[in-house]
Amino acid sequence: MKNTWLGSIYLALAASIWGGMYVVVKIVVAVIPPLELVWMRYLVAIVALLVIGLITRQKWRIHKCDFLLIIAIGIIGNTISIVTQETGTMLSSAQMGAIITSSTPVFMVIFARLLLKERLTVKKGLSVFLATIGVFFIVGVDHVNLSSKLGGISLLVAALTWALMSVLVKRVPSDYSQIVVTTYSILVALIVLTPIVLGRLHAITISQLTHPSIWGGVLYLGVVSTAGGFLLWNRGLQMLNASSGGLLFFFQPVVGTILGWLMLGENIGITFWIGSILILSGVLFVINEK
């Protein structure tokens, strides 16, 4: 039970950090396009992770039989999912983004059943149902701009690939440090993105990068959201089964809505609190499951 609660705290913190990420991305992506932004945040993150790894004296050796798994995590989760997520955030409304990314835990339950043979219980199904209804209450379906089809498709790909990556993380041997796994998977993403991005960097205006909101946003995305968030998420997944852990992802739209209220002056109605209670109920169902 101790591991269940600790793992839940790790996953909830990661999801909360990513909830704040939407506000930051909306600001930064106006200056730095999504692909270049992902590359920059990974460049910052890899430096932060290497420093942490050197300080904590990590063992960086990976067995040959696990290379393909690490590469798959880097390409599916760190490359495809994050690029499509930031592209979708730029193209679509915040409401559509919240609804579509809330499908991630549902995909995680499906992948966990197919790849990890995890048992699908009635309680897990009820938890996903309650949390999903809660998200619909929070974001307000009537306000979704359905014309942003490209953004919606991009966000759906992001949700699907993030769910697959999260299940693949469960297949990484537990004797590897999450710092090492996260560093190598981000390094894979950097190797994939660098040849594409280098030819596009000239389009970014250097003077705009010096604005505190832009470079501060890149630092947040690199150090806090990527290095910190990925470490917390991967560590939490090692302590819970994948289908249960995915429910903590629902904290992302809750925190995003609260930050939108605090920082952007967006209104929060009674439906937000009803939705939050439903999400919390769904999460507690899973945490207390034996």
Image (cartoon, rainbow, N blue to C red):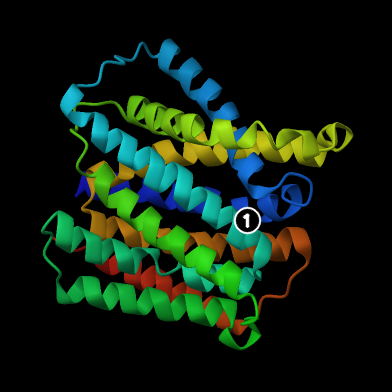
Q: Position of residue 235 (x, y in %)?
A: 32, 39
Outermost residue, bottom side? 142
Residue underneath mark 1: 22
Q: Disc 1 residue type?
A: Tyr
Q: Position of residue 98 (x, y in %)?
A: 54, 69
* Residue 141 placement: quadrant: bottom right
Q: Position of residue 229 (x, y in %)?
A: 47, 41
Outermost residue, right side? 207
The answer to whether 260 is drawn above or below residue 116 in the figure is below
The answer to whether 20 is drawn above or below residue 262 in the figure is above
The answer to whether 16 is drawn above or below residue 59 in the figure is below
Q: Position of residue 161 (x, y in %)?
A: 38, 56
User: Counting other residues with Cα less than 10 Å from the Cα at mark 1, is it few (<14), some (14-19), or many (20 or more)?
Assistant: many
The answer to whether 141 is drawn above or below residue 123 in the figure is below
Image label count: 1
- Residue appearing at x 22%, y 44% in the figure: 170
* Residue 287 visible in the displayed image: no
* Residue 60 placement: quadrant: top left
- Is 183 placed left or right of 202 in the picture? left
- Residue appearing at x 67%, y 75% in the figure: 268
- Residue appearing at x 61%, y 74% in the figure: 95
- Residue appearing at x 55%, y 71% in the figure: 152
- Is 199 placed left or right of 38 in the picture? right
- Is 283 placed left or right of 36 in the picture? left
* Residue 198 visible in the displayed image: yes
Kind of element beneath mark 1: helix
Quadrant location of the C terminus? bottom left
